[in-house]
Image (spheres, coloured by chain):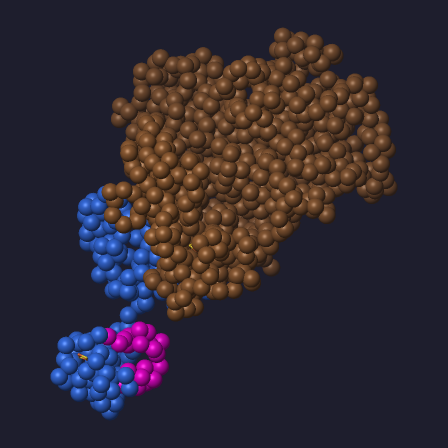
Amino acid sequence: MSNPASRENGVDGPITINGETVRAIDEIVKRYPVAEAALLPVLHKVQDQLGWLPVSALDWVAKRLGLPKTRVYGVTSFYTMFKRQKPGKHRIEICTNISCSLLGAEHLRDHIAKKLNIKPGETTEDGRITFDEVECLGSCGTAPVMLVDDKFYEKLTPEKVDDVLDKLNKDDLEAGGND
Amino acid sequence: MAKVTLTIDGKTVQAEEGSTVLEAASAADIDIPTLCYAKDLEPYGGCRMCIVKVEGIRGMPPSCTTRVAEGMKVTTEDDEILQARRMVLRLLMADHPSDCLSCPANLECELQALTKKLGVREHGLIHLDRQATLDESHPVFIRDMKRCILCAKCVRTCNEVVGAGAIGLINRGHRAEPAPFLGTGIKFSNCESCGECVEHCPTGALYYREPGPEPDYEVSTICPYCGTGCGLVLGVNKGKVIRAKGDPDNPINQGHLCVKGRFGSYEFVNHPDRLKTPLVRKDGELVEASWDEALDLVVQRFKESKGDKFAALASAKEPNEDNYIMQKFARAVMKTNSVDHCARLCHASTVAGLAASFGSGAMTNSIEDMEQAEVVLVTGSNTTENHPIIGNRLRHAIDKGTKLILFDPRDIPLAGKAVIWCRQRPGTDVAWINGLMHVIIEEGLADLDYVRERCEGFEAVEELVKSYTPERVSKITGVPAQDLVEAAKLYASGKPATIIYSMGITQHTTGTDNVKSLANLAMLCGNMGKPGGGVNPLRGQNNVQGACDVGGLPNVYSGYQKVTDPAARKKFEEAWHTDLPAEAGLTITEILEAAEKGEVKALYIMGENPMLSDPDVTHVEKALKATEFLVVQDIFLTETARLADVVLPAVTFAERDGTFTNTERRVQRLHQVIPPLSGCRKDWEIICDIATRMGYPMSYESESEIQDEIAELTPSYGGITYDRLDRGDQLAWPCPTKDHPGTPILHTKKFTRGKGKFFAIEYISADELPDKDFPMVLTTGRILEHFHTGTMTRKSKSLHALVPGPYVEIHPADARHYKIRDGEKVRVSSRRGSIELIAKVGRVDRGLIFIPFHFFEAAANVLTNPAVDPVAKIPEYKVCAARLEKSA
Ligand code: SF4
Ligand code: SF4
Ligand code: SF4
Ligand code: FES
Ligand code: FES
């Protein structure tokens, strides 16, 4: 059994919820008869600001709504759209749906995973890259495809993938190291 | 409540409006199978075992959530229903381990019983092994989630009944399971270890590490720990008490228990360390002796020490009967009124303060009544830990809409439930209470009609609090002015509002002032004598109320009849056929002082352990050692007993009958569960034996006969008899006559003293404030898992496993300042002494440290200040100056 303060639980120091978010939350809460009903939209608002939901955010929401922490945690564990891991600086998403899959996307997925030394859904140790496998990206004609941040890379081969990853590294280094 | 008529399986049934079909059926002896239903939980409708057919309703609704209606026609069983129920079972079995024989719940499992009953042998589906958490972090119970059927009873119990909210359902589908926050081990969560979830689990998913054998028989009695007074059902196997369950028929706990009641209430009873034979000091050593030898010695020495040379300590742990006999012995045989007990150390200021304000020094309203309050002001009471079942009921009330105002410097569990939480500096209570009154009067929120009609002395208070502006009070107390204003307005808005307090208010040199101030506040808003209102001191010990009621105090006989009142004295002289001393006796602290000076030569202590419980214990030790002849009567060789000249082995609560009076003045019956262990005797029998040997014959057939004598001489207990208690009468004193129903709420028509009296009280600071040498404020108290001096709880394996030893709570910023890490050994010193213990970072405010006083190896009371309240003589346990440093 792990201790509550373990890394996989996203313990990440104190957070500040800004005034705008607080105001938006107060508005939301007013619209519901009981605080518990407002839980989903409130979590969304907090995630919008922070980009994810660290433990301190769950704590904050529980206190704000007067709910048991376990209730808030339970809800975030039920819905996959709540991010409980801090996302990396870059986001790589590879499609593994039918067209891409037929053209070797799974092989590419494993290739990337090996190169980054993480599993899909995880973030590299240095916090630079979050890698995930996603459903159809709507570019079946140029399969296999992947999305890096907001940019499409099409008709992928392992070499092409290597090039993209190397370039990402180089850009980051020039931009001042991998902070 | 209106009744509706419906038919269930062709039978005409009457049921209360709003009740469920399941309840109506069960009242008519029609059995419907269930898995997620529990009597004490809200209807859930999760398992679908209880489905029925209702004419005119499509499908098969669950009977546990369907409300009865006039003319409803219900079928509880037919082929289709059975088919559906079997399907539910098959689906549950499909991902359930099929190894009943090695399951801890084998033969007690509700799932197993139902599959047998409905004849489901194979599930016939593709088997899926549940991948679920095995949580072995807790020392007392195990959570094996692969056997979980997701009935959510544990989660609902923990949220609805206990109010801890330690577990919730997480994940979804096949991976769903109940889990604590972040899915960590339950031990690391805010779980309060009450075991209610385990009790409610229908399968082997939650089970005790050491379930113990099945009892041969069970007896209901009362928990020996806190003043809540929960009903226990103790199970006995081969003559030994082996388990405790909550008594569902007791109106206070309704079948629920806290961690102490469940695991700590019996483990000490058959503990091998129990004293089984008298001990007599010979050549400096305590050696075994016969009862005759020990008592002869006691009698000889007591005979030489009559009058002021003798003093006795009664006990807040012992039943009413024994306390009554002890004070009678001191007064009638030893001719002294110097009999006191540890109530002096917890609520003496309550008794003094509330008696002055209202005329009666006890909780004014009942526990149940608290749930009717719109607003609850809690101060100086860590209710969740020290009166857990009251704490649970309070959380329940809050969930149902009661608003909580909390004044407490520590981040106690209730803080998370408060609308307003103010962290006052310890020792500044009079100031913030005056501040609240200032705001209430300024804002025109006082109930002046009530004040005019029912109270007196208001003008002086009105004048005095003028200067207690929020700004000034904020400076004294450290509470933001705005919060004070909000708190005042919220309290005044509660119609009714109640006040709950405990030792955070009483254990100060200004204890009596604090109590009177709370009384002022309650009267100001017209909250006295009403359901859901009142001023409610939670009494710490199981029978501290009773021990005071029956005269375990130096200035009063039973029923608070003054020893200095000639009429009262005459009455007792006639009843006891002897002359009685006319002057009030010494209090606990004074007794010890007199003992040290050699003025008190013989001291008789029954069931108390001043070596841990009294302030400045280094001093206590000196006093006890200086006492020429010390007799200690107890169940274990306590720290105090080790210093005795004669030790007499007594029985525990489980080996006897008797009565305890709980915090709400309710007199409850103890039932003998096992016969006295060989060698041990009941306290009252021992005292009677000594009295008789001294030439004053005292003999009673039973506890019941003593209670009759108490009733005869004590107006407020006049109508309380064992017959009535055994019949199930719920009697809160005053209960003057045999047909009186008891008085759950005091002061309804007028105050006991006539008019409620306001006292104008200025704030004065605590006796010892932090300075350069001792820069921290030390406060002390109890924790959930242990009780008082630990004599009983520390003998419990389970409680010991949960909290094995002493610690000090430190604020994170202070920890950084002193370079102390969580779990490190530190030294805490005061002007009186110094102890070493483990640091626990968190909970307290900056500049404050908290030490629980249960642990002899680092006794908090080595440090505490013996300065006392001038009126009530209660010591200031809650504030002293201390120094903190890393251990060398
Ligand atoms: S033991 Fe009590 S507090 Fe802990 S999870 Fe179970 S019900 Fe909740
Ligand atoms: S652990 Fe037991 S009580 Fe809790 S949901 Fe599972 S089966 Fe029900
Ligand atoms: S709340 Fe008090 S009386 Fe009730 S079980 Fe716990 S310790 Fe015993
Ligand atoms: S299947 Fe990959 S983009 Fe559509
Ligand atoms: S008992 Fe009714 S649905 Fe579970």
Q: Nearer the viewer, residue B624 or B207?
A: B207
Colour for chain B in the figure: brown
Q: Residue at the bottom extreme?
A: A159
Percent coordinates x, y for residue B559 in the rendering: 58, 18
When asked about the image quadrant of residue B571, the answer is: top right
Left or right relative to A160: residue B201:
right
Position above or below: A119 against A42: below
Residue at position x 68%, y 44% in the image:
B240
- Nearer to me, B271 or B830: B271
Residue B492 painted magenta: no
Chain letter, colour blue: A
Magenta highlight range: A108-134
Query: Residue A133 is drawn in which quadrant?
Result: bottom left
The answer to whether residue B869 is seen in the rendering is: no
Of residues B160 and B542, which is closer to you in this image?
B160
Residue A127 within the magenta-colored segment of the rendering: yes
Residue at point 35%, 55% (across, down): B84
Above or below — where is B444 with respect to B124?
above
Exactly how many numbered labels are in the figure? 0
* Rendered location of residue B789, percent (x, y): 62, 41
Q: Residue at x 58, y 47 (%)?
A: B263
Residue B305 place in picture, x, y as percent: 79, 24
